[in-house]
Image (cartoon, grey):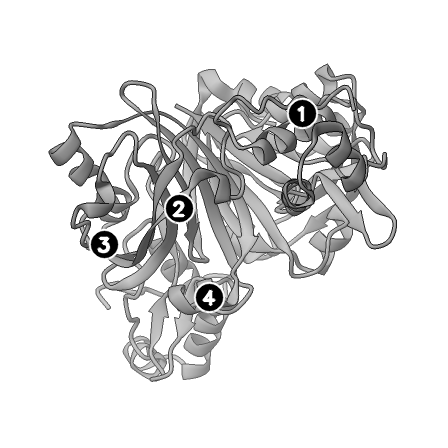
Amino acid sequence: MSLVINIDRRSTLSMDRQIGNQIRRAILNRELYINRPLDRPQQVASELGIDVNEVKQAYQTLINENLLVLDHFGHYKVKFLDAPNNVLINFTSVFEGIRLMGLEPSIETLFTEVVKASSIKNCPVDFKSEKLLHIHRLYLGNDKPMAWIDSYFSLEVFPDLDQKNFGNQPSYDLFEQIYGIKPGQNTRIFGAGLASKEQAQALQILDKAPLFTIDLFINDQYHRPMELSKAFFFENFQMEWTLEVNQLEDFY
Amino acid sequence: MHYLSIDKTLRVPVYNQLKQSFAQAIQEGVLKDGQQLPTEEEVCKAFDLSHFIIRHAYDDLAEEGLVKRIKGKGTFVASRPHYVASLMKLSALDKSIIMRGQSLTRNLQLTQIIQDDPQAYLALNLETNDNCFKIRSITLAQGYPLYQQVWYLPEAIFPKITRKLNSSPRWLDSINQVQKIQQIKNYYTASIANKTDAANLEIEEDSAIFMVRSHLFNTQNHCVGFVITTYPGSTTTFEVSL
């Protein structure tokens, strides 16, 4: 761990609170990223010359706050992911969003199929394309599953898309290269849900863990409906939106 | 069934048209809380549709929380409304409810002085034993909890703030009179309801909640206020259109 922990023995704050605060701040300030292992409590205690239970207590508090996880090998790792301001609110692909979070993005396509628009639940009325390509993908950051995304793409806007080798590349790159189509006006609906068994398994999280959900309705640059997606982001995902002084009316 | 509109010449699936018609009627108050929807048989006959299509539409509406299906009795408008809020304009939800003529009330539930809280004290840069007001309120729309808020305000900065809050419809205005707020950082996340959240929001324990943590910064860029707002995940979503 590159984080240097300092303690002030004259402080009114207990040792475990001082240690916990420094790690918490480092995680929230994006100095420590997800999956980053922390030094073992014994090592930290030895370096600081304090009781190992103080460090264990600090780590346990952070586990309780869902910022850390103790894995099967006894390693304490960062569990929390903080999306930079405006990522996923402003138009950024999930792939780019993961990169902006400081992680190496990759995609795993689970399956593709052609379906009728009428078979989709919550299909918006203006999505007139009769046939859609359903693509189910996992988005990973540093090889850890981050998002489960179910996408439906219009085969009117993207003829023969089902015949193309979609592979594991980002969809918007492919659309621009082959069809000259770019995403345009779009609506995103954010919410909170609980992981199904299947989602929990794919995202390597607990069954019924909280999931950050995003429904996306995307038109292309010619205002044609091109994509309907539902994304489920793993627990401990946080998104930021800042209100400046001239926007305070927008607060409660 | 005057609120239902089906055009079989359109390429839009009939089940979708049916669903949209019901959803619109519920949102516009044409169909009232607790009111029974027509039976599958009635809709079948009126529009010459198959049972499957109507069942499919009703199932979707139930999944979205707009209706509830009671075995042997029928399908009813769910008494708890679903709200779509603006992610960027958090105040817009309250305003839209008031504009629709619906009731919106804030109940001050708990005011106390605390001397520790790991999350709030870190945000506010307070030390253990520093005094901080912790004020919890529940905002109700049409009699159902819309959201719960917990405000953390250091006593050293806001010594008599509770009196001001009690007489102010908008708490940020009262805070601004003491400390000019320059910037608010909001952090959105999904979480699960603990016992207190569940009781206050009238939802099941361990169900999904949408949480907004707000850090209020003054002109010196010091965080002087910390607010946690929680919404029931099942009845509130947040929209952004770009």
Q: Type of residue at label 4?
A: Glu
Q: Which residue is mark 2?
A: A115
B89 vs A80, left or right, is right
Q: Residues within 10 Å of mark 1 (few under 14, many from 20)?
A: some
**Disc 1 to disc 2, how far (Cα)?**
27 Å
Q: Are marks 3 and 4 on the same chain?
A: yes
Between discs 2 and 3, the one toward the N terminus = 3
Front disc: 1 or 2 = 2
Chain at tag 2: A
Q: Which of the two marks, 2 or 3, is nearer to us in this view?
A: 2
Q: Position of residue B170 (x, y in %)?
A: 68, 23
Question: Do discs 1 and 3 share a chain?
Answer: no
Q: Secondary structure at mark 2?
A: strand
Q: In the rendered structure, the residue with mark 4 lies on which chain?
A: A
Foreground pick, A213 / A115? A115
Q: Identify the element where label 3 is drawn.
A: loop
Label at residue B24 = 1
Closer to viewer: mark 4 or mark 2: 2
What subunit carries mark 1?
B
State the CA–CA distance, disc 1 to disc 3.
42 Å
Q: Residues within 10 Å of mark 2 (few under 14, many from 20)?
A: some
Q: Are marks 2 and 3 on the same chain?
A: yes
Q: For mark 4, give the secondary structure.
A: helix
Is residue B77 at all visible to an observer of this figure? no
Residue at point 66%, 26% (across, down): B21
Residue A103 got which mark?
3
A41 or B53: nearer the viewer? B53
Q: Is residue A41 visible?
A: yes
Q: Are marks 1 and 4 in contact (CB under 8 Å)?
A: no
Image coordinates of residue B27 in percent, x first then y, are 70, 26
Q: Are marks 1 and 3 in contact (CB under 8 Å)?
A: no
